[in-house]
Structures are given as structure tokens and as C-alpha cells.
Amino acid sequence: MKLAVSAILFVLQGSLIGAHNVRVGKANVEKKEVNKRTHPEIKRSKMPRSEPKPRFEPKNVSGEPCVNPEDCESGMCTFLGENYADMVCVDCYSNYDCSAYPGFERCMIDPIGVTANYCGPMGGLGEACMEAGDCESGMCTFIGENYADMVCVDCYSNDDCSAYPGFERCMIDPIGVTANHCGPMGTLGEACMEAGDCESGMCTFIGENHDETVCVDCYSNADCSAYPGFERCMIDPTGVNPNHCGPMGTLGQACVEGGDCESGMCTFIGENHDETVCVDCYSNADCSAYPGFERCMIDPIGVNPNQCGPKAGHGQACMVAGDCESGMCTFLGENYADMVCVDCYSNADCSAYPGFERCMIDPIGVIANECGPKAGHGEACMEADDCESGMCTFIGENYADMVCVDCYSDADCSAYPGFERCMIDPIGVSANYCGP
């Protein structure tokens, strides 16, 4: 019962509400109609509308990832990292981008791609570089093993050091360990690459195989002419000591040329004549100014250096006639292989010595020629003038010997009464003589 009553009340309430809404709606329509009549519709213009402002997003700084330059505060984005696979913001691409930052004008580019490019100070001596503009000196070059590294240097050549008094030499390490720098000129014996590296202005090869170059004081004697008492360029033939100016060589000292010696003469001596030493003379003419020492003593076996000495006496070794007091030098000895001073070549050379008018010549070459008395009967001779009798002939077995004889025939005995016969031994044992 209660349910039926409630349902009837609900229906009645809904009808009342619906009728109310119809009346209200109708009234509103009527109101709008009145408004249209009393208030015509105003057309509104379309005003431009601003887009909503996007939220602010800061740009990336050096070292942060980027896709394009607009992502970076610097406006520069490039590759780096292993195999250059990453892109990051950088402060510079080259030194040009750092020109506005005094003291930091160099674009520091990590060659292994770990650190992002940034502006830094110019490189000092020995610091790594990629180009000359990376260095305070404005010079960058290769050094190191196989010249694989590039570093800042102070110079490329001596010209770059000309503005630094006392340090005008570009010190270039031949093994590439130390960076080029300006240093003092090289002194005697110091390593060099060119003449301009040395105080003396001279650089040459020395050492075994002449494979080293060092500073020297001279190339030749002419370079020492300004140093009295040291006019000789001392050149070590073994290449151990560097050339330097020293005193002229004396007798027996090693030399290379005549100008190395006080005497002005240098020649070969020694076994095989493979050494050169200073000598006093080449020939007797060089000794003519030394009375009593007019002979140039030349050692035939090359042990002693040539020197001026006295003339050689009878039987002493000689090379030319001028070596001898007698002015005569000839062969004697076995096979006539030796030369000695002699008193004579022939009897004519003894004519000035009464009683010694004969030139005694040893037929076997043991005794040097000398002037002696004429030979008597039966004594050996070489020619008739050797004999007191003035006659010399063959006797002996096969008539192989020559001796002085008193006669060749009876006519030669005519002056000897009672001995008018020339006694000639048919077997050649006794020398010819005058007999009854």
C-alpha cells in the first residue's frame, strides 16, 4: 500500500517539474525575442592571439652531447671520442675561434679525442702541437723516434736564433729527443751539423769511418795563419782528435804536406814508405846552406827521416856522388847491389896523388875503390896503367887472370943488357919477365 502511494506521488511530482520547465523555457525564448527587437546583435572582430610562450631550455656547454651547433652555447658541435663516434659541444674548431681571448688564443684539440676542444694558452718549448700557430714561438716540427711526434720548438735553423746574442745556434738533437732550442755556438770538438753551428765557422767529419761531424779550428794551414807559432792545422789521420791549430812539425814528426813542417818538407818513410814525416831535406841541394852538413842523409830502409849531415867518407853508403867527400859513388858488393863512396873511378882520378896514381878496384867488390901505388911484377891488374911497368896481360889456366908483366916481347927487354929476352911461361904460371 505504501509502495503504491509513493509511486503516485513520484509521478505527480515529475509532471509538476516538467510543466515548470516548459514555462521557464518559454519565457526565456520570449525574452530573447524582446532583446533582438530592442538590442540588435553586435558583430565582434577577430583579434590576433599570441602563441603560448615555450618553457626556457638552457643550451649545452662544452663537452656535453649535441646533434647540431644550435644545441651548444658556443654554437660549435663536432665529433670526438673513440673512432670519433660521439658529437659534443666544443669551444672552438681552430685557433681562429680563440682569437678573442688574450692569453688563450690556441684551440686545444685532444689528439686522442677524450677532451672536448677548448681555448688555452700557446704551447711552450717541447709541448705538443699540431701546427706552428699552436706555439708561442710560431714554430712546430717533428721530433722523437721515427720523427712521429710534433712539438713546439724555438727554431728551425740558426737564422731563427740571430736575435739572441750568445745563443745564435739552433740546437737540433740528431736523435730527436730534445726539442730544437737556441743555444751557444759549438766549440772545438763539439757536435755540429753545419759550419754555422761553430764558433770557428768550421765543421767537418772525424771518427772511425769519418761518420761524425764536429766543430774544428781549421780545415788547412791557411786557417791558422793568424796565430803566430800555431800556423799548422793539426789534422789527426786516425780521426780521433778534431782539427786544431798547433806549432809546425819538427824533424820526424808526422805531417800531411810540406806546409806542416818547420822545414817546409814532408815525405814518405817507413816500411813500404807508408808514413809521412817532416824532413830536413829532399836532396843535397836543400843542405847547401849548412857548411859541413851539405849531405841529405836519406835512410835507404826508411827508418830515419831525411836530415842534413856531413859528406860520407870512403866506403860509406851513398845514393849519389854528391853524398861523398870524394864526389864519387859507385856500385860494389855481391851482384853490385850496394852503393858506396869511392876515391876513384879510374887511374885518372888518382893522378893528383904522387905514389898513389893507381885506382885500386877490387874485382870481387868487397873493398871500395881507392888510390894506391902502381902494381909490381906478377900483381893483379886490370889495365896496363895499373902496373909500374906499364904492361898488364892474361896468364893462368885458360888465361883467365891478368897480372903486371915486365914485357910482352923481347923488344921490351932491350934496355936491360944481359936480360934482353922476354921470358914467357907457356903454361901461364909465371908472369913475363926479362931474362938472359
Image (cartoon, rainbow, N blue to C red):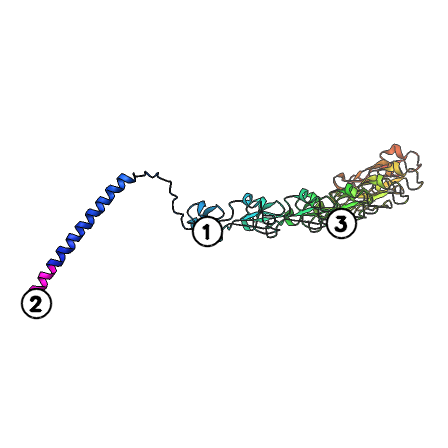
- Looking at the image, which residue is at 58% across and 52% down? 127
Q: In the rendered structure, are the residues bearing label 3 and label 1 in contact, judged by CB atoms less than 8 Å apart? A: no
Density class for disc 1 (Cα within 10 Å; few <14, some 14-19, many ≥20) is many
Q: Residue furthest bottom?
A: 2
Q: Secondary structure at mark 2?
A: helix
Depth check: 115 or 335 in front? 115
Q: Is residue 11 left or right of residue 99?
A: left
Q: Is residue 96 left or right of residue 219?
A: left
Q: Picture coordinates of residue 343 (x, y %)? A: 86, 42
Q: Amino acid at mark 1?
A: Asn
Q: In the rendered structure, are the residues bearing label 3 and label 2 in contact, judged by CB atoms less than 8 Å apart? A: no
Q: Picture coordinates of residue 376 (x, y %)? A: 88, 42
Q: Amino acid at mark 3?
A: Val
Mark 3 or 1, nearer chain start: 1
Region in magenta: 1-10
Q: Quadrant of residue 232?
A: top right
Depth check: 186 or 189 in front? 186
Q: Which mark is residue 2?
A: 2
Q: Amino acid at mark 2?
A: Lys
Density class for disc 3 (Cα within 10 Å; few <14, some 14-19, many ≥20) is few
